[in-house]
Amino acid sequence: MTGARRIGLITNPRSRALREGRFALAEAAGGLPRAAPSTPDELRAVLADFAGQGVDLLAVQGGDGTLREVLSALPRAFGERAPAIALLATGKTNLAARVVGTPGPGEAGLAALRRAAASGALRQHRLPVLEVLRPGLDEAPMRGLLFGAGAFTAAKTMADEGLHGRGIHDRLAVFLALAGTVLRSIVQRDHALRAGSPMSLSVDGRPTPEGRRFLVLATPLDRLMLGLWPFSGDGAGPLHWLDVAAPPRRLAAALWAARRGRQQPWMPEAGYASGRAGRLALRLDAPFVLDGEVFEPGPQGLVLSAPSAVTFAMP
């Protein structure tokens, strides 16, 4: 990037770290347009004001959920001239920051960002953004980076109820929730979890076999946390997708394959389908997760795509 940037600062007032008194921004934020909106309406108004002030670099202090809300509100506020985003990560998982980078969550990080922006020394990472449309609901698409349904929702619920309340966060919480979900399915033979949920999935207009699904994932990211990569590269389009039939077969071996980052020859016959696509249409009745928060599907299911991209910046 070249040239000085006009920085605006968005802070999530409900961030755990900030409520605990960590990563407060004082001197480094001096003179910047800044706000801590507590509702989606407030966020949209703030972003519209930032757009009017010519902000072209948005520093977001929060976690993956904060980023999801900002990404969802950007099109209405900025139109096609979206600002670059810098992540001052203070969330519970911070998946996006681990993939695209972060200058740091507090004073030092923001100060480094301002120096790099002033000197034109920012690095950039252009990334497609996942859009989740709930047809039948009067709302704009939600935008984020990681979608999951089925066992992914179960793991998220386990993290919220059994781990975050005990002060376990970040990668440790992800690992324990994932391990717990796998153990419930394999060792405890949790029949409700193994039975999955009724879902139908269409990939770029091509229906996949009907049946119950144990897990569905989709992301435009090129890597995840903990060294896991459960996707294969077949197909075209910005979205990586994974579809696991219920009940899951050879789940431990599939998890090991994801740790090695490549699909094994036995997996398609065992109910593991994966690839790349431009559009996924999903019918389901069970809740899904988008960037760390659980949502209900629309009356006509979901449509997932990635029609646009956002630039992430860091020193």
Image (cartoon, helix red, strand yellow):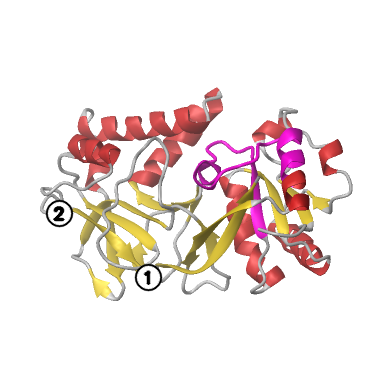
Q: Residue 305: horizontal and vertical position, in percent?
A: 43, 68
Magenta stretch: give its range: 84-113
Label 2 sits on a secondary structure element that is loop
Left or right placement of residue 95 versus residue 26 in this view: left
| Vertical arrangement, residue 285 with respect to residue 255, above or below | below
Left or right placement of residue 152 versus residue 60 in this view: left
Label 1 sits on a secondary structure element that is strand
| Vertical arrangement, residue 138 with respect to residue 290, above or below | below
The magenta stretch spans residue 18: no
How crowded is the residue under tag 2: few (<14 C-alpha within 10 Å), some, or many (20+)?
few
Q: Mark 2 — residue?
A: 268
| Vertical arrangement, residue 275 with respect to residue 180, above or below | below
Q: Residue at x 29, y 51 (%)?
A: 231
Residue nearest the observer in this picture, 118 or 163:
118
Q: Mark 1 — residue?
A: 279
Q: Residue at x 24, y 71 (%)?
A: 207
Residue nearest the observer in this picture, 179 or 4:
4
